Amino acid sequence: MTNSTSEPSTSKPKTCMDSEYDSSILKLEQALSRIVNSIQSLPSSEQVPIQRALDRVLSHDIISPIAVPPYDNSAMDGYAIIYSDLIAAKEVQLQTVATILAGTPYDGELSPGQCARIMTGAKIPRGADTVVMQELVTVSGDTITLNTNPKQGDNVRRAGEDISPGEVILKQGHKISPADVGLLASLGIGEVKVFRKIRVAFFSTGDELKPLGSVLQDGQIYDSNRYTLHAMLSRFGADVLDMGAIPDDRHATQTAFITAAANADVLITTGGVSVGEADFVKETLEQQGNVSFWKLAMKPGKPLTFGQINNCWFFGLPGNPVSAAVTFYQLVLPGLQKLSGQESIETITVKVPCTSKLYKRSGRLEFQRGILEKNPQGELVVKSTGNQGSHVLSSMSKANCFIILPLECGIIEPGTEVEVQPFFGLV
């Protein structure tokens, strides 16, 4: 309902004896499995020019129509030679019969005792099989003397060395990167088929939430969650439908659900999933659709709801801003990736020493916000951003990683090795 009220503060020491464990509540991995196993990728696709294909997800395999490179070419500026000439003479002197530029092949064929001046990327002339760097020869008129003993095939890039005709170079489900766009262009492919963008509707709930530009009255706050969600969804690449802030009203909540389910593939709400008298989100989902789960053994983010309304998937995120962000990255994002047809993405984590003392009670998996950095010795370490309250959005702004503390662990002393999930592994 709100994006201001804090979950219990973690700023005071708590011991492993103060457990929050409830065996009836789903663990993160169970919830994630339920989400990705329920959701199927969208069947529809569209064809787009590669200039508009960045960050789109391929709906079919890309098969190379040509070899790359398409012909043997030089990797260096130098001289194309016949390797057998090196065996036939003690001191190798060769006559230069041509200069070959990239894009201007030599029509002739080299004979024994001949060579050709050649530039990087130029096609290797017939008869030649080796390129000697220009720095390793002595030039006198149209004659060169080799000052090295190259190996046969040196500095020659063979046809198909990178890609063979008929080779699958990008698979269905691959999210296209800038390098992929260049790769497609190198193959002469100007258009690709991609899954259509998924449409995500979202709204906040709470009478206390006011839009930017409003003058706050006593008890009111600015609605930050919608702007955070808009940014995360835009970076993901979804078509977004911002439905604003919905008041704590049963009819308004029901109407918003109906509108979202009719116009979007996914509905995401923040707030209203707890058990307060004015929390109507879970109630509405139960009436209009179905609830798969609504509590998790994780912190922040315990009150998270997942379900479905007709053909629209639903994620009800907690109202506290950090809780909303953490649950989006850990649970919503994998669901959106599955729905968009994207191939499975493995979460990137590393283990590094923690330089801060971290407070935690056993019983819930916890995602604390951290700063991953190098110490004076050049080694990676992590430190806490400070106050870990789920209302402290500045802890997300300062952070560049999550410190993942397992369900069973308690207080972490400085110097302890912890698991860290860098933000660059998310979106």
Image (cartoon, rainbow, N blue to C red):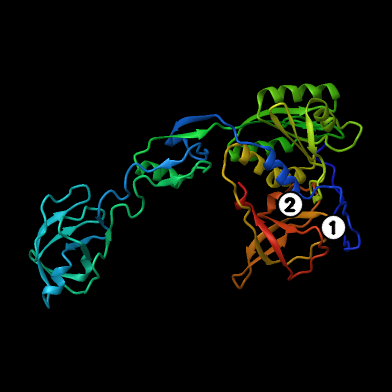
Q: Which mark is residue 248?
A: none
Residue 202, quarter of picture: top right
Question: Residue 11 — which label?
Answer: 1
Q: Is residue 90 above or below residue 187?
A: below
Left or right: residue 153 compared with residue 210: left
Q: Is residue 80 left or right of residue 363?
A: left
Residue at position x 12%, y 76% in the image = 91
Is disc 1 surrounded by few (<14), some (14 to 19) or many (20+) residues within 10 Å?
few
- The quarter holding residue 272 reads top right
Coordinates of residue 194 in the picture (x, y in percent): 50, 34
Residue 300 image offset from top left, x and y in percent: 79, 49
How far from the left and from the top, in percent, is residue 342? 57, 41
Q: Which mark is residue 395?
A: 2
Residue 325 appears in view: no
Q: Picture coordinates of residue 224 (x, y %)?
A: 73, 38
In front of the other: 390 or 150: 150
Q: In percent of the image, x 83 and y 33: which residue is there?
A: 282
